[in-house]
Each structure stands twice: as C-alpha cells, then as structure tokens.
Amino acid sequence: MPYVTSWERMGTQKGLEQGLEQGRLKAGRESVLDILEERFGSIPPDVLARIDQINDYSKLKQLHKSAITIASIEAFQNLLKE
C-alpha cells in the first residue's frame, strides 16, 4: 500500500468536503425548483438562472420555505430580486 502524506490526506479531505457541499447545494436548488414546478407549472428562465447562481445553502433553505407558501411565481420572482 502506498504511503499517503498528511498533505495528501488533507487535500483529499478538503476535496470530499467541497464535493459534499456541492451536492447539498444541488439538492437545495432542485428542491426549490420541484416545489415551484409543482405549484405553478413551468418555471420562467430567469428564475431558473437566478436559483442556479445561489451558492448559499441557508438562502436556498429560505427560498424552499417561501416556495411552499408564496402566492404566485411573480411574487417569487420579486423575492429573488431582493
């Protein structure tokens, strides 16, 4: 078995953490989009693009909750502009 230095282990750990965070963000985005699609049908391209650019899981979590209760896709678009 090859020897793995502490630097290599640290790099591997960092890579794993980044991968997990990217997966969490992807799941958060998909969750928001699934709710919007279920409630309002098709999703406007600008909403898709804005959600795709969000790299903050807590923001995605807030949007997820808002998507459940918001009155319209237009109101959601306005929320994204804030």
Image (spheres, rainbow, N blue to C red):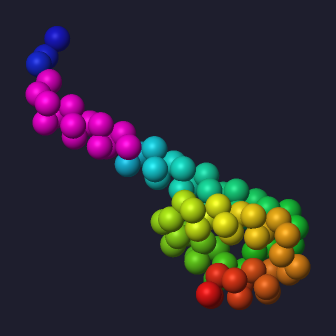
Q: At which x and y percent is residue 11?
A: 22, 40
- The residue depicted at 62 percent of the width and 87 percent of the height is 82
User: Based on the displayed image, in which of its 4 quarters is residue 64 positioned?
Assistant: bottom right
Q: Is residue 7 magenta?
A: yes
Q: Against 6, is 15 above or below?
A: below
The answer to whether any part of residue 41 appears in the image is: no
Q: At which x and y percent is residue 13?
A: 30, 37
The answer to whether any part of residue 9 appears in the image is: yes
Give the magenta range. 4-17
Query: Relative to residue 37, is residue 5 drawn left or right?
Result: left
Query: Relative to residue 17, is residue 28 drawn left or right?
Result: right
Q: What is the tally of numbered marks visible in this picture?
A: 0
Q: Nearer the viewer, residue 34 or 71?
A: 71
Q: At which x and y percent is residue 27?
A: 61, 52
Image quadrant holding the N terminus, namely top left
Q: Nearer the viewer, residue 38 or 20?
A: 20
Query: Relative to residue 7, is residue 13 drawn left or right?
Result: right
